[in-house]
């Protein structure tokens, strides 16, 4: 018998549900959106998800061209360098941030920064701008842009990103591509197409 009270899933249970969701389920929900973006731009688009304090690629779509992206499902994205990882970690609790920052934060290129002050400034910028970049921080000559995916309760467990050669990502089309990512992120919340 209902007593008329509304119940909500607690933070720990909600995190557990999203962290243990089957990648096939996530891929089924996101693949059409990512394919649409890839077809329209001939660039690589991907969705990452938070698992504990780690950010992992759930699904990736690359164009059928000679250059293929390194972003493959199952790989962990470095929280201090990857655009989608920064887009997710920026909206997590201090405890999750501390756990994420306690991992090895390697200097992957000359552009990688791993000092906590810089990372925290970058995460604050994500929350202000609503997007984040990775410019040669993981691989020289490659760049990425990403936006967080807000669930209906404003939590962030997912991020959408686009990656490719620096000159093709960081150009005059960036604003248009960010708008396309934001449009998908606003309409995809991890539950529906």
Image (cartoon, rainbow, N blue to C red):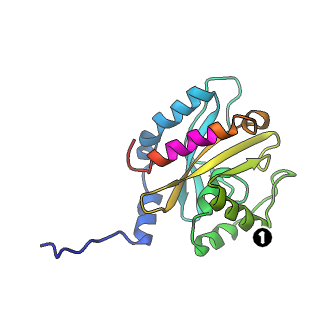
Residue shown at the point (51%, 47%) measured from the top left: 185
Q: Quadrant of residue 70?
A: top right
Is residue 182 shown in magenta? yes
Describe residue 40's horizontal placement relative to residue 138 as left or right. left
The residue segment tinted magenta is: 177-185
Q: Vertically, is 122 above or below 74?
A: below
Residue 54, image x and y in percent?
60, 60
Please give the name of the residue rendered at 39% of the width and 72% of the height, measured from the top-left corner. 10
Residue placed most toward the observer, 146 or 173: 173
Q: Crowding near pointer 1: few (<14 within 10 Å), some, many (20+)? A: few
Camera-nearest residue between 20 and 89: 89
Element assignment for label 1: helix
Q: Main secondary structure of the magenta part?
A: helix
Side of 187 where 166 appears, left or right: right
Residue 108, percent from left and from top: 80, 52
Residue extending farthest to the top is 65
Residue at point 63%, 71% (across, down): 99
From the image, tell me which residue sits under label 1: 117
**Quarter where residue 79 is shown:** bottom right
Q: Residue at x 59, y 58 (%)?
A: 88
């Amino acid at each position: 018998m209902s007593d008329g009270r509304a119940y909500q899933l607690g933070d720990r249970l909600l995190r557990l549900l999203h962290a243990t969701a089957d990648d096939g389920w996530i891929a089924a929900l996101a693949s059409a959106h990512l394919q649409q973006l890839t077809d329209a731009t001939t660039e690589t688009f991907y969705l990452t998800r938070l698992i504990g304090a780690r950010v992992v690629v759930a699904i990736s779509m690359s164009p059928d061209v000679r250059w293929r992206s390194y972003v493959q499902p199952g790989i962990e994205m470095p929280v201090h360098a990857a655009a989608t990882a920064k887009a997710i970690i920026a909206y997590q609790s201090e405890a999750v941030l501390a756990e994420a920052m306690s991992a090895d934060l390697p200097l992957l290129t000359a552009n990688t920064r791993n000092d906590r002050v810089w990372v925290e400034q970058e995460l604050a910028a994500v929350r202000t701008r609503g997007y984040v970049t990775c410019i040669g921080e993981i691989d020289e000559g490659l760049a990425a842009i990403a936006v967080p995916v807000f669930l209906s309760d404003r939590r962030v467990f997912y991020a959408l990103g686009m990656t490719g050669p620096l000159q093709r990502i960081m150009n005059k089309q960036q604003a248009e591509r960010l708008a396309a990512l934001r449009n998908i992120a606003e309409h995809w919340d991890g539950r529906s197409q």
